[in-house]
Amino acid sequence: MNSWLTPDSFLLSFSSPGLSSMTEGLGQLTDGVSGLDDFTQTHEYHVWPGYDYVGWRNESATNGYIEIMFEFDRIRNFTTMKVHCNNMFAKGVKIFKEVQCYFRSEANEWEPSAVSFPLVLDDVNPSARFVTVPLHHRMASAIKCQYHFADTWMMFSEITFQSDAAMYNNSGALPTSPMAPTTYDPMLKVDDSNTRILIGCLVAIIFILLAIIVIILWRQFWQKMLEKASRRMLDDEMTVSLSLPSESSMFNNNRSSSPSEQESNSTYDRIFPLRPDYQEPSRLIRKLPEFSPGEEESGCSGIVKPVQPSGPEGVPHYAEADIVNLQGVTGGNTYSVPAVTMDLLSGKDVAVEEFPRKLLTFKEKLGEGQFGEVHLCEVEGMEKFKDKDFALDVSANQPVLVAVKMLRADANKNARNDFLKEIKIMSRLKDPNIIRLLAVCITEDPLCMITEYMENGDLNQFLSRHEPPNSCSSNVPTVSYANLKFMATQIASGMKYLSSLNFVHRDLATRNCLVGRNYTIKIADFGMSRNLYSGDYYRIQGRAVLPIRWMSWESILLGKFTTASDVWAFGVTLWETFTFCQEQPYSQLSDEQVIENTGEFFRDQGRQTYLPQPAICPDSVYKLMLSCWRRDTKHRPSFQEIHLLLLQQGEE
């Protein structure tokens, strides 16, 4: 048999006592090709069967074993030997039953202590396999292995050794103790001095990174608290969140110390418990109240009032009543409504009529959101569809400008139901200073609600086109101080009506106030949808958009929206009015600095920044603004008090 092997580092010699010997070869046993289970097959083409194996017949060995000697270029520390053997016992081929390995260092004699490794024969599985022989870290430059036959044939296709270069030469016998001799690998040796330098650099880098992280966390502490608080509600809290037409509903059972401070679930992901009355929930979301079959089909027949859970004693709550958040087509919260109030308002059928869609003449798109759009339309014949107790702000038989909120046809079921619920609620709001729902188009897609729209647009654009009466410009129209006070009084009146229903607007600003004839004001809710005012909103992590320059400190830091936070926003709206909307609130501050300023309001150490007194604003009105921005919500005036105060000042 002629089998040549290639590695230069060691040589192989075969010997079959009494028969023959072969030397200087290893190619077949170290070519990296393991033989197949069936030795008659091969990986190569055009070669004879069994090409991948080197085999011996038992009859050729008088002592019952085959001896192979491996010589290496240096003394090495051997860990294991792996032999790939065929075990096709049906044809008389088996793995060896035992191997004995002898070791020699350079030209010395073979060491008397050998490594013997008996094997358990496998007569069940004929698969070829690697047999691993432990060599116990023996050091040698040559190894002689005696492989004992277990059957007629013994066939090997690969033999490999795992070893390292020995650290020293020891010609004596080594104990077979599991304790490994000292070895070294030039590839793994590292200079101690370099190691110390490397470790020192890593430690310095770690300290620098930690310092940077601490600085970033300190500077962004308050901004990080701008995330959603709805997922940190109490276990027994349920809030009905009407995403119209945005997200699916969620319930929380919110309570507060007084009915005037109705809170809603916030726009953020979580709330940081800065006070002990914020508790950690064990369940985050509860099941929505189910509609009866008739209710689910129409989507317009009221919601089921949640049952008040009997929570454990001593557990504080956020709000006193269940809260319903009404949201516009942009997905931003517009109103927060107590569920009890919502039951009263939505207990009947929709109080508006179906409007023929073909009579709508679209003029322009005012804004859009994730699930819907707001369009400015012109209609004729609206007098036939309006309530008898409501008068349109136009002459008879004249086209009427209306705002149309339109739900996209591909909106999901939750968005559709929420849109219809908003219609029910808005149809019950009847106040001269709140935009009125005039009609609906809900018999086919896309669903629409038709609301008033004032001929002079929103208050922000209206005032920016005017100047104070003492202005030097002769071509720009003016608005008197009395008319400014009159418009502010109407805003307070509309908010007084909403607060009497425990509604929280959450986005009160001049952009959400529409101006009609003779300086009449009506509060609306679609300012967020307009691209014109995208700069007034601060986007959090690409999701929620918040009017932080109008929001109270507790709304920004705690996600807490109440009637008192609407009072804060009214103070900012009043400031806008008396500056003729010539600049944003806190225009000298970046969004991040505005958030930092809310932290100063929270700490209340006298370093907070207030909006300055407008040039034409009297001291009494600026004093009212400052009272709206008091840190303690209990010390802020109510809308009833604000409205009364503005009425009294208007009579002076």
Image: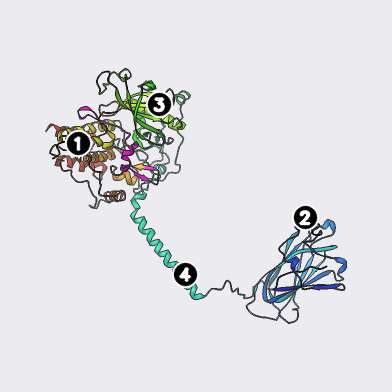
Quarter of the image holding residue 385? top left
State the CA–CA distance, disc 4 to disc 2: 52 Å
- Precedes in sequence: disc 4 or disc 3: 4
Q: Earlier in the sequence, mark 4 or mark 2?
A: 2
Q: Residue at x 42, y 27 (%)?
A: 446
The residue carrying mark 1 is: 466
**Which residue position holds label 3?**
302
> The C terminus lies in which quarter of the figure?
top left
Label 2 – label 1 distance at C-alpha: 96 Å
Where residue 21 sits in the image (x, y, percent)?
A: 83, 73
**Percent x, y for residue 264?**
35, 38
For badge 2, the amino acid type reads Asn
Which numbered dot is residue 488?
Answer: none
Q: Which residue is mark 2?
A: 125
**Mark 1 nearby-residue class (10 Å; few <14, some 14–19, many ≥20):** some
Amino acid marked by disc 1: His
In the rendered structure, the answer to whether residue 98 lies left or right of residue 493 reads: right
